[in-house]
Image (spheres, helix red, strand yellow):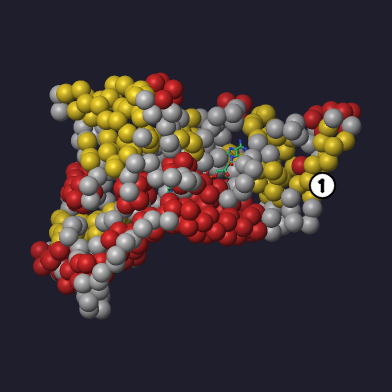
Amino acid sequence: MGLCRSIGRNGILRFTVYTRLFHAEVMQSSSPANTFDAVVLGGGSAGYAAARTLAGSGLKTAIVEGADRMGGLCILRGCMPSKALLQAAEVRHLARHAATWGIRVPEAALDLSAVMRRKDALIESFAQHRQAQLTSGRFSLVRAQARFGDPHTLILDHGERLTAAHIVIATGSTVAPPPLPELAQVGYWTSDEVLAMDRVPPSVAVLGGGPIALELAQLLARFGSEVTLIQRSARVLREFDADAAQALEAALRREGIRLMTGTRLTGAGRCGNRKFVQFEHAGQTTRIEAEELLMALGRHPNLAGLDLERAGVRVERGRIVTDAQQRTSQAHIFAAGDCTGPHQIVHLAVRQGEIAAHNIARPQQPRAFDQRLLLQVVFTDPQVATVGLTEHQAHLRQIPFLSASYPFNDHGKSMILDVQEGFVKLLATPGSGEILGGTAVGPVAGELIHEITVAMAKRMTVHELAAVPHYHPTLAEIWTYPAEELADRIPPMPGNAP
Ligand SMILES: Cc1cc2nc3c(=O)[nH]c(=O)nc-3n(C[C@H](O)[C@H](O)[C@H](O)COP(=O)(O)OP(=O)(O)OC[C@H]3O[C@@H](n4cnc5c(N)ncnc54)[C@H](O)[C@@H]3O)c2cc1C
């Protein structure tokens, strides 16, 4: 049997069963209906952003999406469900510590099914919104898995072919394989299982020390699990400055999470109903038993089955190689989002998708991805956020800088909130005082960091930031302290003062 395609009013390519003869014809030639100016492979954050921009530029565009449920990682199994659950965990944590503010809460009991129902309802509404965007008719939506046949042809899993002058690969990421083969036999949770759990395991060993590992470790601990986090490097959050990681480690330890850093995993197994991991730590072999193991060692670009070699697209260290214009080694093929790595962050995925589309539609006015304003946020409590340059990166790249920081526990509004850890830090150029980067570890750091992002986008100096009015008492006014300190140390010169 073969398939024939028609485009419905909502832009979905519909496939109808026809005769084997017809199928053979379709397999051999591409009709104008399945020939596009641009085809986007993957309908997640990067893919949707690319398709919307391409169609908005007047190009005949299709998205090919292979998942049963549309929405992409961020909405279905990433940012949004994890943040919905973290919010519930924070409310419980505050209720359990309400006595700090003189409020008695007799029992802050967890109703996990109610928590999950709220999360599911939110996700359903976000997913419906994305589905409406994908089926709006601005571009065609093809529900199929696709792989490359040649540099201009995609073969769909039901045999149909699409041809395109340009292709954007936006196929996302998958959980990295376990570091030890035993782990696959023992069985483990990934973020997917945590986000859909119907019981809170009494104890969990978390493998990993990146943002997702830390967020889920604190979530599980605040829901009642006894959590041990096992991390290979000497501290958590390798990409952040050591002072930021240490402040978060102190806060997590104070909450009762056991952190074991500088470890080397050597084995895993089962012990009755429990699971264990074995590792070297501080010169000794240590074994941690728990009800569940959570593997949170990161995600890899999802390139399996794409047959990229048929398209001539270069892959290095498992990632599609692109230039700053999101162009791959093939001039007409672009890539965006998690499949390009190394930063798996949703607003980057969106921006990269838009840049790829822009450069397809308007190659004579190319746009490039600007790494200067790279933002990263970890939604733990305290939150950890950074934009631009960190001290660690400045040292590595031998960029001269001055830095100043200010602690939250010496700041009026934070003391009202009972904030015990964290700080804000600014980096500036010694000569002009231009802000090079900011880090915040503390309450709503993920919101606060945007003040520095805006300042950096406008290339403001510390003198200019210090002179911006800040309402009192607010958390945001804490930025004025390091800004003032740096402004005092960097003599004003024409152009850097307000
Ligand atoms: C637990 C968790 C929490 C996170 N929290 C945050 C956060 O707070 N903030 C943040 O910025 N980021 C967060 N992220 C990361 C963020 O979700 C991703 O960076 C982002 O969703 C990637 O978007 P994408 O478009 O590249 O990929 P995806 O959204 O995964 O889209 C890829 C799409 O391609 C489709 N596809 C794949 N292969 C094929 C094929 N061969 N044919 C057809 N279709 C195909 C897939 O079905 C999928 O829909 C989190 C991730 C996780 C796992």
Q: Residue at x 25, y 66 (%)?
A: 98
Percent x, y for residue 388? Answer: 30, 53
Q: Which of these two is toward me, 189 or 482?
A: 189
Task: Choose top left, top right, bottom left or bottom right for residue 330.
Answer: top right
Assign a secondary structure to mark 1. Answer: strand
Percent x, y for residue 71? Answer: 58, 50
Is residue 202 shown left or right of residue 345? Answer: left
Q: What amino acid type is highlighted by mark number 1?
A: Ser
Q: In this view, does 471 lie above or below 169?
A: below
Percent x, y for residue 192? Answer: 47, 42
Q: Which of these two is toward me, 201 or 27?
A: 201
Q: Which residue is drawn at 43% across and 56% down?
A: 111
Q: Is residue 218 above or below residue 263?
A: below
Q: In which quarter of the image is the C terminus?
A: bottom left
**Residue to which mark 1 is pinned:** 6
Q: Does the residue labelled 1 lie within 8 Å of ligand 1?
A: no
Is residue 374 shown left or right of residue 146? Answer: left
The answer to whether residue 131 is seen in the rendering is yes
Q: Which of these two is toward me, 163 or 120?
A: 120
Is residue 82 shown left or right of residue 262? Answer: right
Q: Quadrant of the N terminus?
A: top right
Q: Which residue lies furthest to the front in this view?
A: 106
Q: Residue at x 74, y 53 (%)?
A: 11
Number of callouts: 1
The answer to whether residue 126 is seen in the rendering is no
How many C-alpha atoms fall within 10 Å of the one at disc 1: few (<14), some, or many (≥20)?
Answer: few
Percent x, y for residue 422? Answer: 19, 57
Q: Residue at x 20, y 23 (%)?
A: 285
